[in-house]
Image (cartoon, helix red, strand yellow):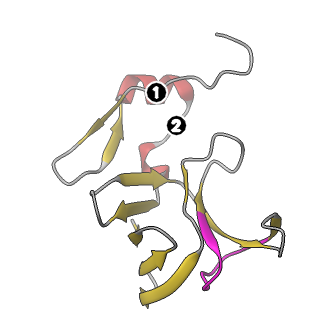
Amino acid sequence: MIGGAQPKLVVAFDEEGNMHLNPLQAELMGIDKNQLNWKLVRERDGLTKQSKDIKWVEWNEDNFFKADHPQPKVGYSLIMSPFNQYFTWQTTMITEIVEQREDYIKFKTQNSNYELFKL
């Protein structure tokens, strides 16, 4: 493997848009498919991302990281694990929270509308 390069995973998507890892590769890498706890769906094109964990990121006046939070709020962005340079997905800042329940949130960002599900 090339130093600094992220290893590639073999994945497939089912009819519902859920991502699944190749079971043998996942086992060899020590990944438990049941660790994917969150699913994000972008409204305009159905783009689907899944991750083990999420954080809501607050930005300072210069648009640099200020803090992370466990709950969403207008002005925060969503980031999906892993929480390093290889994160799964990051949204632009939330402009409106349309609906929120314990296991679901529908929200609008500066350029997209999303639904986030706790699996």
Task: Identify the mark at residue 9; answer none if there is no mark.
Answer: 1
Q: Residue at x 57, y 23 (%)?
A: 7
In the image, is residue 98 part of the stretch drawn in magenta? no
Q: Nearer the viewer, residue 51 or 79?
A: 79
Within 10 angstroms of label 1, few (less than 14), some, or many (20 or more) residues? few
Distance of label 1 from label 2 (alpha carbons): 11 Å
> What residue span does the magenta drawing correspond to?
67-78
Please provide percent x and percent y for residue 87: 61, 47
Q: Residues within 10 Å of mark 2 (few under 14, many from 20)?
A: some
Q: Considering the image in quadrants, where does the N terminus appear?
A: top right
Q: Quadrant of residue 117?
A: bottom left
Residue 8 higher or lower than 18, as above or below: above
Disc 2 designates what residue?
A: 31
Give above or below for 91 relative to 107. Answer: above
* Image quadrant in which you'd find residue 94: bottom right
User: Where residue 52 sits in the image (x, y, percent)?
Assistant: 54, 54
Amino acid tagged 1 = Leu
* Most distant residue in the top direction: 1
SS state under label 2: loop
Report x, y in % for residue 69: 71, 76
Q: Secondary structure at mark 1?
A: loop
Mark 1 or mark 2: which is in front? 1
Quadrant the C terminus occupies: bottom left
Q: Position of residue 99 (x, y in %)?
A: 40, 89
68 is within the stretch colored magenta: yes
Is 50 positioned to the left or the right of 45 in the image?
right
Q: Nearer the viewer, residue 98 or 118?
A: 98
- 92 and 33: which one is in front? 92
Circles 1 and 2 in contact, beta carbons < 8 Å: yes
